[in-house]
Amino acid sequence: MVRLAVILRDTEIQGIAAAIQNMLLAAHASGLGGLWIADVYYAWEQIEAALQKHCPHPLVAAIALGYPAESPRRPPRDYAGVTVRLTELG
Ligand SMILES: Cc1cc2nc3c(=O)[nH]c(=O)nc-3n(C[C@H](O)[C@H](O)[C@H](O)COP(=O)(O)O)c2cc1C
């Protein structure tokens, strides 16, 4: 039973993460800038106050959206040393 609860919780969090990613992609496609914020725990009370609502469910993340004031160049990514190895399961 505990294992099932963990699986359900993890599945829900994966779904939330996928939804956030899709929202950020949609925002970007619409010309908006977006920021994924996982550190919502520190500001739980302020977020509830801003929403003027008690949040009955755990707050997992937030997204900040806005029109970018600038268009900075994409920072260089260092992929050196990153190896993906596919292994056969079974
Ligand atoms: C799961 C996840 C959680 C994040 N949480 C935070 C956060 O709490 N605070 C923050 O400043 N950035 C957070 N970030 C990073 C920003 O959303 C963003 O990706 C980062 O600032 C790099 O942005 P850029 O690629 O546009 O420069 C998080 C990113 C991910 C993927």
Image (cartoon, rainbow, N blue to C red):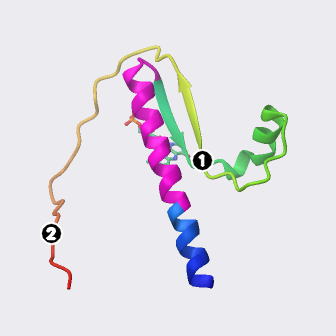
Q: Position of residue 75 (x, y in %)?
A: 28, 34
Q: Which residues are magenta?
A: 12-32
Q: Position of residue 16 (x, y in %)?
A: 53, 51
The answer to whether 52 is drawn above or below residue 81 in the figure is: above
The answer to whether 47 is drawn above or below residue 39 in the figure is: above
- Residue 13, numbered circle: none
* Local secondary structure at mark 2: loop
What amino acid type should be assigned to the residue bearing mark 2? Arg
Asked if the stretch drawn in magenta spans residue 4, the answer is: no
Q: Residue furthest top?
A: 69
Q: Main secondary structure of the magenta part?
A: helix
The answer to whether 1 is drawn above or below residue 54 in the figure is: below
Name the residue rendered at 39%, 32% in the picture.
25
Residue beneath label 2, please?
85
The answer to whether 5 is drawn above or below residue 59 in the figure is: below
What amino acid type should be assigned to the residue bearing mark 1? Ala
Asked if the stretch drawn in magenta spans residue 15, the answer is: yes
Where, by quadrant of the figure, is residue 87 drawn?
A: bottom left
In the image, 42 versus 89, the foreground residue is: 89
Task: Say left or right for 50 vs 22.
Answer: right
Residue beneath label 1, please?
61
